[in-house]
Image: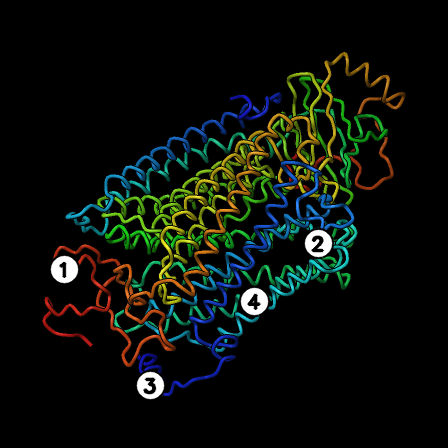
Amino acid sequence: MLDWWLPENVSTYGRDIDWLFQLIYAITGVTFILVTVALVAFLIMYRDRPGRRARYTHGNTTLEIVWTIVPALILVVLTALSAPAWSRIKMSQPPSDFVVEVTAKQFNWQVKHPSSDKVFLDEMHVPVNQVVLVDLKSQDVIHSFFVPQFRIKQDAVPGRTIRAWFEVTKPGRYEWPCAELCGFGHSGMRGWIYVHSPDDYKKWAAENLGAAATPAETKPETAKPGDAAKPADKQPGGKAKK
Amino acid sequence: MSAHAATAHTVHEHHDVGFVRTYVFSTDHKMIARQFLFMGLFMMILGGLLALIVRWQLAWPETAIPGMSVFLKETGGILEPSTYNMAFTMHATIMIFFVIMPILAGAFGNFCIPLMIGARDMAFPFLNMLSFWTTFSAGIIMLSGFFVEGGHAAAGWTSYAPLSAVAQYTGVNWGQNLWCISLFVMGIGSMMGSINYITTIVNMRAPGMHLFRMPLVVWSLFITAILLLLALPVLTSAVAMLLFDRTLGTSWFAPSGGGEPLLWQHLFWYFGHPEVYILILPAMGIASEILPVFARKPIFGYHAMAFSMIAIAFLSWIVYGHHMFVSGMSPTLGMAFTVTTMVIAVPSAIKTFNWLGTLWGGRIQFTVPMLNAVAFVSMFVIGGLSGIFMASTPVDIYIQDTYFIVAHIHYVVFGGSIFGAFAAIYYWFPKMFGRMTNGLLGHLHFWGTFIFFNCTFFPMHIIGVGGQMRRIYNPMQYEFLQHQQHWNVFITYSAFLLGVSQIFFVINFFYSLFAGPKAPMNPWNANTLEWTAPSPPPHLNWGDHIPTVYRGPYEYSDPDAREDFLPQSQPPAARAGARRH
């Protein structure tokens, strides 16, 4: 069964997504079984047999109303249940000063960690239980930031900076593929996200981000246009500011 | 009706027009229908082979494909990533634009509309011929792309800009240009066809054939034509803009010159979502036509069926954003598209329940067209239900761009449209070609297709939930996907058997075409008007008199009638006492 299911979830909002997935799975599963059982039963019960005539009926208004309203109600409920999770995941971000700048290109993720201008290729390091804001850009075509175990997916669109976020609850090493066709090297465009305990992250940052590791707020603005240090409200991605 | 009088007059002027005007540049809607059918079936072979190449690569990545060393000389038959991208791009492009649309809208639109509304031909027979040859030219242009330097388009059938807009991003130059030109030409051909269909249905119905006596397949083709008329021009414009970006240096979609990549997605899906309904509505109509005939029962809820199709058509304009939930489009807008997407599920549910209602209490005959029509209903249920996962925005974040989407689209367009097309081919073959198809071969084809279709596409839900992305070249490059690779192997075996099952169809089709038993006028004891014309119908369809319509199309098993069917054109002489004119 585990082989047949969603990969392990390790992010905070992943629980909301998985819960909705399971709910829809249950609703559609039951519907499918009911419809299929009815269909097969009708095919067997009403198969052509000599001496029988089909029922002469053109429909039933009560039934039409019932099978219009019942699915409509179920779908209204599903919409209502989807809205809060969507709002939480995509329409706003929790406050955080841990901003990672990710610029996708054919066929790599280029990563700048907070308070450092050093570019890492296909490698991101973040602390566990920390809201990580990602300023997502692309320098050529559309790519898509996908980490199956985080339940995150966000396209990177050239010409825009789109802010996404995640918060991981379990340290580990997680695969980070590109999910949008981006050329002949699309398959295999893949990075790794290392989630450390806070202490391990500090240690890693000290060793790898070097002297440039100063607090994010005091980081000087670089001359490069469209840099991650721009405040969120100047971003054209249509995101609500925090 | 004046059109009736005018065309009835011309029937006497009919004379032999020679081989070219009869078989090549024919203006007869039935010949054009056959031309569309042959074109679609030929392209289906090509599209299917491309799919098998893709499947081989996914099951046994980077191994030589048997027989492909002829085409891929440098690699000895191994598919390279760029060729792989080309294969799946062209598989989808061909199947959607040159298989399903020509067969369902082109062939059966042309064949059914005049015959089922009681018209002698289309409103504009010459435009009809032009529509086919324009579409045919588009097909030739599309195929020529395989032979140009750099290969054919490889940016996916959705051709998202800027990947598709700048040649060096894919390395494809003229392939993508020809892709744009071909779809542009196809768009023009389709516009000619849709204007013709709409005009014919509005103006040329036989006496007594008011709108709510029209067979549901005519309703579905009418609504499809309206969608085609309004949706295709958006694609036609978009591919022209894309071509200008690629060749003339404009910058609609590439941000380097101030363009907006999401504009392409908005234009594409504004066409693309109605397109999905263009592909499925005729199949819905076909199922609604065939289920009553072989259940010997009136369709359940005729008006609900017609109005739900109208609702689907209207709503299909305002749901397209659900393809773009994670594209960077405003998430607030995404919420609005969730609401409309959930709403469009309701008419689909209504249709499904009405099909079940039609079977209930029937006297079901398991003919080959009936089996295909029932398969359509059950496969459409799966395709419809899996769509609800995508409608829920948070769930879509995860399953977007995975094989779950691939499974969903194939349950809708293969499980739906292709089973609908097979049902239609088996059902109207006697009328179209004047010969019956072989039942045994038909059953073998149906059961092989039904079983291996499900073995091929159902496990795609599973690997999609496991996270496998669509359009990847080699799943084994990803650690989190390696544990489910056995599914990819299973799917590929099933896909090959699905392909093999089609051999029964090819044999049946050509055997029956030349050596099938002669078809009677009304082999299925059906009510609609096409069964009152000879098999196959002559030029201008009926002799001196167009049939007059006295009732709806689904009067089966009326307790007052002696037979269990009551043709639309049979005068109610016994009860009404007088003939109506």
The reply to whether label 1 and label 3 mark residues of one chain is yes
Q: Is residue B396 left or right of residue B167?
A: left
Categorize mark 4 by other alpha carbons within 10 Å: few (<14), some (14-19), many (20+): many
Distance between the Cα atoms at labels 2 and 4? 27 Å
- Quadrant placement of the N terminus of chain B: bottom left
Q: Which chain carries label 4?
A: B
- Residue that numbered label 1 is attached to: B561
Q: Give the amino acid at mark 2.
A: Phe
Please say if the residues under marks 1 and 2 sit with CB atoms less than 8 Å apart.
no
Q: Mark 1 lies on which chain?
A: B
Q: Give the amino acid at mark 1.
A: Ala
Please say if the residues under marks 1 and 4 sit with CB atoms less than 8 Å apart.
no
Give the foreground label among 2 and 3: 3
Of label 1 and label 2, which has the lower sequence position? 2
Please say if the residues under marks 2 and 3 sit with CB atoms less than 8 Å apart.
no
SS for tag 4?
A: helix
Horizontal and vertical percent position of residue B358: 27, 48
Give the foreground label among 2 and 4: 4
- Residue pictured at 68% horizontal, 37% vertical: B61
The answer to whether residue A157 of the structure is visible from this angle is: no
- Residue that numbered label 3 is attached to: B9
Horizontal and vertical percent position of residue B145: 69, 60
User: Closer to the camera, B281 or B286?
Assistant: B286
Q: Give the amino acid at mark 4.
A: Thr
Categorize mark 1 by other alpha carbons within 10 Å: few (<14), some (14-19), many (20+): few
Distance between the Cα atoms at labels 2 and 3? 55 Å
Of label 1 and label 3, which has the lower sequence position? 3
- Residue that numbered label 4 is attached to: B135
- Residue pictured at 40% horizontal, 41% vertical: B381
